[in-house]
Image (spheres, rainbow, N blue to C red):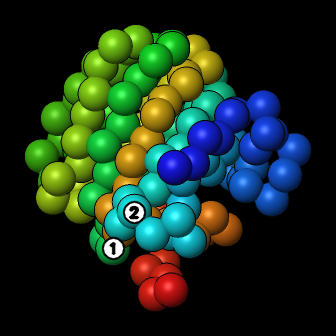
Amino acid sequence: MKVIKLEDIIGTDNEVKGENWTSRRLVLNDVGMGYSVHDTVIKAGTETHIWYQNHLESVYCIEGEGEVETLADNKVHPISANTLYALDKNDEHLLRAKTDMRMVCVFKPALTGREIHDENGVYPLVEA
């Protein structure tokens, strides 16, 4: 069994920062669960282009307000606390944060921990 506290992740290599976000990576590929779990903060007033071509992701918003626009159909989905969205078709999307947003993100397959979005908003698929 693993017990992981957020306070033990902050300030370590498992806290990864992008231009618009900070991802605290709690469960990663090396644990062998087949998925990874992240506590992510999205900065207010930002828009992030994301397209996880190699991963499926479920995102549970626990704080804040924003929206997700799926680019295949240009639908805008309001997101606020206690809302989950699942990118079940590797959906290319824009994530817009009206306020700071705190999200719990689950990726399958699991991330290794150092991934950063490329120019297309994609995380590489890293085989362990």
Residue 119's spot in the image, x, y percent? 54, 71
In this orientation, which residue lies closer to the viewer: 108 or 33? 33
Question: How many labels sit on residues?
Answer: 2
Q: Which mark is residue 33?
A: 2
Residue 118, image quadrant? bottom right
- Which of discs 2 and 1 lies nearer the camera? The answer is 2
Apparent side of residue 55 relative to residue 11 in the rendered image (left or right) = left
Which of the 4 quarters of the picture holds residue 83?
A: top left
At a point 34% along the width and 13% down the height, the residue shown is 82
Left or right, 37 with respect to 20, comes to: left
Q: Residue at x 51, y 14 (%)?
A: 63
Residue type at numbered disc 1: Asn
Q: Position of residue 43 (x, y in %)?
A: 65, 29
Labelled disc at residue 54: 1
Q: Amino acid at mark 2?
A: Met
Q: CA distance from mark 2 to mark 1?
A: 17 Å
